[in-house]
Image: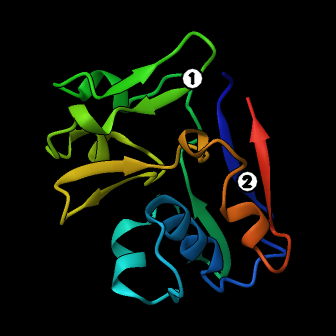
Amino acid sequence: MPARFPVLDPAACVPCGLCEVACVEARYGWDDLVPDDPRVLERRRLRIRVVAGLPALDVCFHCAESPCVPVCPHDALLRFRDGRVELIEDRCTGCGKCISACPYGAIRRVVDLDIAVKCDGCAPLGGEPACVPACPSKALSLAVR
């Protein structure tokens, strides 16, 4: 299975946060969330932030070097031959080493679960990433590597 991840067109993005809401609703089955809901802020697997006046997307790009993988002491991060980098949440102890190693801020800590998470393109959910169709300005698209 190739790596799948959302890509942002900053010119089209109106940082509304609906992609983050869709991410959390798809993953946890919660409904009627809003962008500033603490559950969204805590559990989102991607993040839109504004840098120098432009929206930027913090998401795993499945780096060729993958600096997060070798620092994980529990083999919770794996790099596959096809280039995918997966985080196996059942193995994660929440130590945070991968979070510090990621140059893109793509790995986040979920405090109440005491684990790290990252965007997995909604692959375990069996469809396209929930964030892409949720974007009202069509600023997100799916990249496959």
Query: What residue is rendered at 60% in x and 70% in y?
Result: 22
Q: Quadrant of residue 16?
A: bottom right
User: Measured along the vertical axis of the image, is residue 1 above or below residue 137?
Assistant: above
| Residue 25 shown left or right of residue 133 in the figure | left
Mark 1, residue position? 64
Neighbor class of circle 2 (other Cα within 10 Å; few <14, some 14-19, many 20+) is some
Q: Nearer the viewer, residue 54 or 32?
A: 32
Query: What residue is rendered at 18% in x and 25% in y?
Result: 74
Q: Quadrant of residue 70?
A: top left
Say which mark, if any, is on residue 7. Answer: 2
Question: Which quadrant would the N terminus be assigned to in this image?
Answer: top right
Query: What residue is rendered at 61% in x and 62% in y?
Result: 57
| Residue 47 shown left or right of residue 22 in the figure | left
Q: Amino acid at mark 1?
A: Ala
Q: Secondary structure at mark 1?
A: loop
- Residue 112 pos. (x, y %): 18, 66
- Residue 93 pos. (x, y %): 14, 40
User: Measured along the vertical axis of the image, is residue 78 above or below residue 33?
Assistant: above
Q: Secondary structure at mark 2?
A: strand
